[in-house]
Image: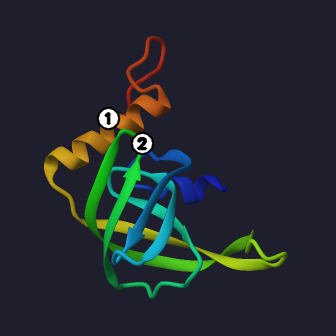
Amino acid sequence: MTEARQERRRSPRMLVNGEGKGHLKATIPVTAVNLSAHGLLLELKAPLRPGMTYELSAFVPEQTLRAVVRVTRCRAGGYAEDGRGGRCLLFRAGAEFASLTPPQRDAIRSAVDRSLGVGAPGILEKS
């Protein structure tokens, strides 16, 4: 990933490494790839239209998250085994939180900070 791309991010992200499983609209299975206090990257088997909002229910490290997300981008992101000897196309969708309570945002921010070692001795805290 280029440095210019990293600089556009509003807040640091933590890799979820497949631990974040959930659903959009209670029926579309998704996996969280990474997470920040402002949004997340989702992986799923169907494309999503940018600008659309969806109800997300997911377990991300340390908490169950229920929020409305707005899709900012979506593109093909690879393939996965389909369980029948073939492969299916996977999509990656960036989404921003459209509704998070302050306690939810604080909990996500704390989890991200812990995963990145922010506040640990010898590590500079991010402003």
Q: Residue at x 43, y 17 (%)?
A: 120
The answer to which image quadrant residue 67 occupies is: bottom left
Of 5 and 93, the residue lying toward us: 93
In the picture, which quadrant includes the C terminus?
top left
Give the secondary structure at mark 2: loop
Is residue 127 shown to the viewer in this render?
no
* Closer to the camera in the image, 114 or 5: 114
Structural crowding at the residue carrying mark 2, measured as other residues with C-alpha within 10 Å and reported as few (<14), some (14–19) or many (≥20) = some
- Image coordinates of residue 43 in percent, x first then y, are 56, 68
Quadrant of image for the N terminus: bottom right
| Circle 1: residue type | Ser
Task: Residue 86 in the image: state x and y as whole percent.
Answer: 82, 78
Residue drawn at x 70%, y 80% is 89
Q: Residue at x 39, y 49 (%)?
A: 11
Residue at the extreme front of the image, as rendered? 84
What residue is disc 2 on?
61
Q: Does 111 sit above or below residue 49?
A: above
Considering only vertical position in the picture, is 1 above or below 122? below
- Checking the image for residue 110, the label placed there is 1
> Which residue appears farthest toward the top when viewing the image?
121
Q: Is 41 displayed left or right of 17 in the figure?
A: left
- Say which amino acid is labelled 2: Pro
The first of marks 2 and 1 along the sequence is 2
Residue 46 point in image, percent of width and height: 56, 83
Q: Is residue 108 left or right of residue 13?
A: left
Please count the marks in the image.
Answer: 2
38 or 69: nearer the viewer: 69
What x and y, as percent, mark residue 71?
40, 77
- Tell me the CA gap for discs 2 and 1: 11 Å
Above or below 28: residue 114: above
Packing grade of label 1 (10 A; few <14, some 14-19, many >=20) is some
Q: Residue furthest left?
A: 102
